Image (cartoon, grey):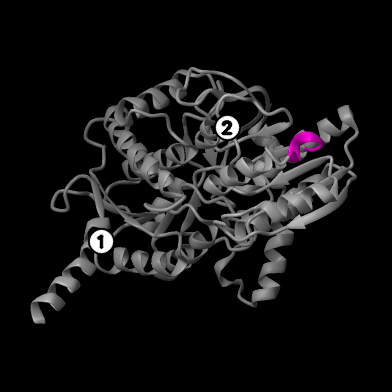
Amino acid sequence: MFRSTLLLLILAWLPAAQARIELGSPAASADATIGCMFPLAGRAAIYGRDSIAAMKLALADLAAEVKVGQVPRLRILVEDDRSKASVATRIAEQFIDRDKVRFLCGVVSSGVAQAVSRVSHKKKVIMVGTDHASSRLTIENFHRYYFRVSNDTWTSMAAGARYLADLQKKNRWQRLAFIGPDYDYGHVVWRDLEQALERLGVRYEVTAHLWPRLYEPDYTAYIARLKAAQPDIVVTALWGGDFIAFLKQALPAGLLDKSLLANFDTGGNYDVLVSLGEEAPAGLILSARHHNNWPATARNRKFVSDFYRLEGRFPTYAAEGAYAGIIAIGRALATAGLQADNDKLIRVLEGMHLSLPEDPEGYVSHIDPETHQIIQAQAIGEVERNTAFSPARLMLGRWTVYRAEELQPPLDLVRSRRAKAVGAAGNPGSRRPPRSNL
């Protein structure tokens, strides 16, 4: 009886013990330890696996690009947050209390990121977000320890609103429907799109708002409601496996027969393009936070080819976000000094310029000191045949590119949303008013 019970306890313990992955320098020689959280199982697991691979590339590029003697020896710990806020909170606290990490990083779900950001603020440990996108994290819930190094929902929706405004001049669309996951990310996408369209003076009628749960397996009823609403265009914030499942059900149901479908933040991800197979659906407008075939720069080609050599496959956009996160942390330590305190590291990160794979020629990403959000350009494309990135038979092309300066949240919007959040929460201590040069 005792031996059976002991065996069960050991088996129950093993998955947690095996879940931790360590990269980089060993604990005894590391200059800094970074605690990262990603989903490593389920629909979103590919983003965790791609992030781990990209962090390996970042370590190699730091060693090659940073001056000899200034390259920080980084130890990276990765654990599976299972896309659950409670799990990620526990992991983040253990990273800080037990492993003495100097940075937290990663996180795919915006809802999970909100929880980890609260730990970062409470514990005064810098968090570098690499994938989640809710603009609430850098506007309403801004605090000095949080930074994000991938496009957020405001960036994507500002680009999407410009695309829709231009499209309306061509085809006179009027009726718009929206479908997004029923949690922070989905609702913030809709709010950001509404505000961006309003600022451009776009007039339209909303025919439906639909909110399926995250990881919904069956979208049949939602697709039927979208078709009944008869929109000219459907905008969706479904992402990853959810968007793939939605497309697999929506295309044969004829949703695109009379409506365009746009996903401006995550829809152009490589795994989505692979899932489409051979046929390029007409009326599909997509973008993502990184593209394997845009921009056509030496740095992007190097990143994509390095990833392929390492993994034997092409990356999803999550990879470039994780790559940027480790590059930002490494360069901050190299600039501020290995023993620099948080105040100095924050000053270095604020306004930091980073040449990244997704930067078009002549542009360098930089972190806005007022929001701690990276400022980047965005390209929106249409699906077309392209077999250069097998097993995908389709990629995006016919690009419309929006300059980074067009996509930065306006000062008055940042002020207004922060003021409303402070009034609702009654807690102004974690936020600071923007300066006039935002």
Q: How many residues crowd around disc 2 within 10 Å: few (fewer than 14), some, or many (20 or more)?
A: some
Quadrant where the N terminus is found in the figure: bottom left
Q: Is label 1 in contact with label 2 (beta carbons under 8 Å)? A: no
Estimate the x, y position of residue 361 in percent, counting from the top left.
55, 20
Which kind of residue does numbered mark 1 sit on?
A: Pro
Report the residue marked by disc 1: 15
The foreground one among 379 and 383 is 383
Residue 415 - label: none
Disc on the earlier residue, 1 or 2: 1
Estimate the x, y position of residue 347 in percent, counting from the top left.
45, 50
Q: Secondary structure at mark 2?
A: loop
Report the residue marked by disc 2: 276
Q: Over which residues does the magenta segment extend?
A: 254-259
Q: Quadrant of residue 330?
A: top left
Q: Is residue 334 left or right of residue 216?
A: left
The foreground one among 402 and 388 is 388
Residue located at (73% from left, 38% from top):
261
Estimate the x, y position of residue 429 in percent, counting from the top left.
57, 72
Residue located at (34% from left, 43% from top):
52
The foreground one among 135 and 220 is 220
